[in-house]
Amino acid sequence: MEVKIQAKEIHKKYKKNHVLKGIDLTIHQGEVVVLIGPSGSGKSTFLRCLNYLEEPTSGTVSIDGEQLAEDKKLNNLRKKVGMVFQHFHLFEHMTVGENIAFAPRLLRVLKTKEDINTRVEDLLAQVGLSEKKEAMPHQLSGGQKQRVAIARSLAMNPEVILFDEPTSALDPEMVGDVLDVMKQLAKEGMTMVIVTHEMGFARQVADRVVFMAEGVIVEEGTPSEIFDTPKEERTKQFLAKVL
Ligand code: ADP
Ligand code: MG
């Protein structure tokens, strides 16, 4: 399998707080990797390092074999990686359609009004929100907002999408719709790295589950290896609390 993202020996320190302590992770084309672990273990920080929203204190991240660095090329490589956050981060003063059209229009990925409009409508259909193009974000439920956020991320044709607890801020009855959209993306071959506490979803959709604690990868394996036969004591303790 082709390597899509390679993180090597990633360390991140905030002042004296040594948050990531040497993380190595390779993500292959089409792979769905689910990252689990206790709160504060560095999952979000690591995810942000993967697209240089956060610059690692040391270590390297490569996308398609090209190393990320704080220079001009960063924007090009970053375009390949979409991100979906726990709290949606929609542009509140724009309609749903404008939210989705914003980046491809600004970056001239789509040039004509017709192309942009068609793309917006296709994406809204894909996330089951065809009726909401003219709605404002505040008129949507949390689950609908998150599906708009996913559509917005897809609008740039990313090759990888990073999800940071995409369903943690949702009412329970909204979670399923968002997970269904993610399942469909996985089925279509999207490369995805997902931080989540939805263990049922992880078991169903992940190719690989990675358990992180205190800034290191403690253990990784198939969902069955991690959930049914964890090897490390730390993993067992965590799973005992969340399963
Ligand atoms: P998780 O996502 O696993 O809950 P985080 O990556 O959010 O963990 O946080 C790991 C540690 O890094 C925590 O101690 C947190 O306080 C610290 N941290 C995260 N982001 C920042 C930041 N921007 N500035 C300072 N400390 C941070
Ligand atoms: Mg987090």
Image (cartoon, helix red, strand yellow):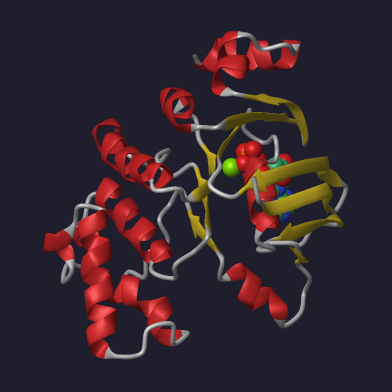
Q: Is residue 44 above or below residue 203?
A: below
* Residue drawn at the location 49% of the way across and 14% of the way down: 243
Q: How many marks?
A: 0
Q: Quadrant of the N terminus?
A: top right
Instruction: Note whether residue 93 is visible.
Output: no
Judged from this view, the residue extending furthest toward the front is 1
Q: Can residue 50 be seen in the rendering of this structure?
A: yes
Quadrant assignment, res 126? bottom left
Looking at the image, residue 194 sits to the left or right of residue 144; the answer is right
Where residue 157 appears, as percent x and y from the top left, is 44, 67
As drawn, 119 above or below 59? below
Residue occupying the point 20% across, 52% down: 128
Side of 168 relative to 138 (left or right): right
Q: Position of residue 30 (x, y in %)?
A: 53, 47
Quick one: which residue is furthest to the left in this view?
131
Question: Which residue reaches farthest bottom?
Answer: 112
In the displayed structure image, the side of residue 114 where residue 25 appears, left or right? right
Residue placed most toward the observer, 139 or 121: 121
Q: Position of residue 227 (x, y in %)?
A: 56, 15
Query: Residue 216, located in which quarter of the rendered image?
Result: top right
Residue 79: image location, x then y, percent: 56, 71
Quadrant of the image occupied by residue 105: bottom left
- The answer to which of 112 and 130 lies nearer the viewer is 112
Query: Residue at the spot x=72%, y=29% of the render?
Result: 213
Residue 149 relative to residue 128: left or right = right
Q: Residue sitting at 39 percent across and 42 percent down?
A: 187
- Specify the quarter for ligand 2: top right
